[in-house]
Amino acid sequence: MTFVTDSAVKALLTSETTVPLRTRFEGANICTWIGFKHINYLVEEAILLHFTEAGLQARALYTEHGLGVDLVDLDTRILSALFMDETVEAHVVPKAGDEDTDVSFTVTLTGERDGAPTKLVAARAKAVLRRESYIEEASEPPAPIARFVTDRLGTPVRGLQTPPDISGLDLTAATTSLSAGRGTTGPDPVLDLLTAGTNSFGWKWRIPYPYCHFSERLQMSSYLRQMEEVVDLFLADRGISVRTLMDERRWIPACPHSKIQIVDEALMEEELYTVYTVEDVFKDFTYTSRMDCYVVRDGKLVQTATGKVTHGYAVVDSRREWNLVTFDERVSKALRGEA
């Protein structure tokens, strides 16, 4: 008898859960503040625990029914900094209309500030169940959850442009030079095409297996890592690397908002083309950028993800305190791509 019952699915779709979560030591890259990537990991963990509370554990769904739990849309606003060794309350509220083919969630992380409970993070996410096809073909999914099952990841994104035609490019002309073992940022015909005429930075990178799950595909948490990494490479390329500004001024990037949507699947050991484009610099205080990810498959460019991220800068006043600062001319020009 399957554990995927009507009552379990009803609990998944209608019950709210609240669980305590603890920030991870790994996320404290500057002093004891937790970066946006690890804050998003807490959001993902809260959603997975919501599945578990409903009796629909991710491991059991995969092993018994060949269904992989995948986040395909994640939009997170950080309202206040989180710290190392901090326990927050994660409150998860699900939502799915009768015709929806994904499960939507709102996730709130609350912690204590000045002796009072305070909302620290507000996030929205969507999850689907991806049918197994790599190890062995999965049987028909249990009826109560069948409408959330898909044979391929992807979520509609309004206004997304068709990738450019690469049929005329010489793909053998791609450079073999590496950037500190992190893939190429040098001459590459696909990167040149994707970044031409824009305030963009391009990065080509081979998808390694530690970034994948369910045996074959890049997962949402890895796109978060990709977003963090491409920002780091972009800043270094513009002469204002994280280490440079930390050494010179004690400035660090601060991220109040990130959003990632999976458009199609990216597979282990494919080469991922990531394009990071600065779209807007607002009053020399924050800047908003877009991340677009592609693979070349069957001679065509296929977009696999898109996202947006907002950054500012904070000055580290001490091991305990930081404050947001206004960009100076050097940083402003670097972000705008001006000489």
Image (cartoon, rainbow, N blue to C red):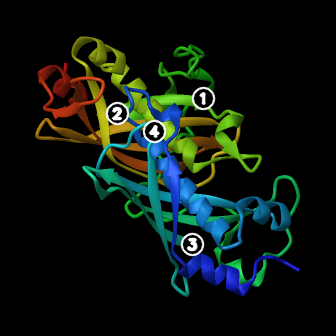
Circle nearer the viewer, 3 or 2: 3
157 and 61: which one is in front? Answer: 61
Instruction: Examine the image and state in which quarter residue 204 appears.
Output: top right
221 left or right of 147? left
User: Looking at numbered disc 3 in the image, what kind of residue is underneath it?
Assistant: Asp
Image position, residue 194 (x, y; %): 43, 37
Disc 4 crowd rating (10 Å Cα; few below 14, some 14-19, many 20+) is many
318 left or right of 164? left
Looking at marks 4 and 2 on the same chain, the residue that comes earlier in the sequence is marked by 2
| Residue 78 numbered tag | none
Looking at marks 3 and 2 on the same chain, the residue that comes earlier in the sequence is marked by 3
Q: Mark 1 sits on what residue?
A: 171
| Residue 227 numbered tag | 4
Structural distance between the alpha carbons of marks 3 and 4: 24 Å
Q: Mark 2 sits on what residue?
A: 200
Structural distance between the alpha carbons of marks 3 and 2: 33 Å
- Secondary structure, mark 2, is strand
> Looking at the image, can residue 195 be seen?
yes
Q: Is residue 339 above or below residue 34?
A: above
User: Looking at numbered disc 2 in the image, what kind of residue is underneath it?
Assistant: Ser
Disc 2 crowd rating (10 Å Cα; few below 14, some 14-19, many 20+) is many
Looking at marks 4 and 1 on the same chain, the residue that comes earlier in the sequence is marked by 1
Q: Is residue 128 above or below residue 204?
A: below
The answer to whether mark 1 and mark 3 are in CB contact below 8 A is no
Image position, residue 187 (x, y; %): 48, 20
Looking at marks 1 and 3 on the same chain, the residue that comes earlier in the sequence is marked by 3
User: Looking at numbered disc 4 in the image, what kind of residue is underneath it?
Assistant: Met
> Looking at the image, can residue 262 be seen?
no
Structural distance between the alpha carbons of marks 4 and 2: 14 Å
- Secondary structure, mark 3, is loop
Q: Mark 3 sits on what residue?
A: 102
Instruction: Examine the image and state in which quarter residue 181 appears.
Output: top right
